Image: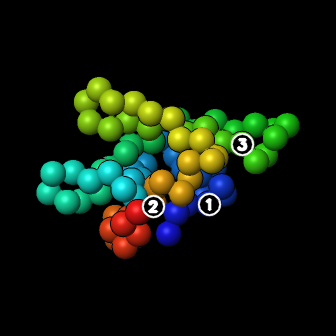
Amino acid sequence: MAITLEQAKALRQGQTIYHVSNRNSDGTPQRWRVTSVKTWKRNPSRVQVGLKYGLRHYDTLREHDLDLVCLTEEEALGEKA
């Protein structure tokens, strides 16, 4: 099950989330570490989550991309998008 907007806002630095479709070579979902969470007071429907994967790969998760990640590895394996 993909994360909701409220769950994305509750993420904290260092927390791990799992990608639904990207897999490692052994078939496990990719693990992304949260680096920052940004929210807006004027527009509560927005969220921007900074992510890190591996040694040098960074990405940003926004409110329209929340269906790409899950909070647990089991959920990410079950979705197989």
* Amino acid found under the numbered disc labelled 3: Arg
Q: Which three-letter amino acid code belongs to the residue tagged 2?
A: Leu
- The span from disc 2 to disc 1 (Cα, nearest Å) is 10 Å
Most extreme residue toward the top is 56
The residue carrying pointer 3 sits among few (fewer than 14), some (14 to 19) or many (20 or more) residues within 10 Å by Cα, namely: some
Q: Residue at x 26, y 36 (%)?
A: 54
Horizontal and vertical percent position of residue 57: 33, 30
Residue carrying label 3: 46
Asked whether disc 2 touches disc 3, contact meaning CB atoms under 8 Å apart, the reply is no
Specify whether 74 is left or right of 49. left
Q: Which residue is most to the right?
A: 42
- Where residue 32 sits: x, y (%)? 37, 45
Asked whether, in this view, residue 80 is left or right of residue 7, the answer is left
Q: Amino acid at mark 1?
A: Thr
Question: Circle 2 is placed at which residue position?
Answer: 71
Mark 1: secondary structure: loop
Whole-angstrom CA distance, mark 1 to mark 3, is 12 Å
Q: Residue at x 14, y 57 (%)?
A: 26
Which corner quadrant of the image does residue 7 belong to?
bottom right
Residue denoted by label 1: 4
Per the image, label 3 sits on a secondary structure element best described as loop
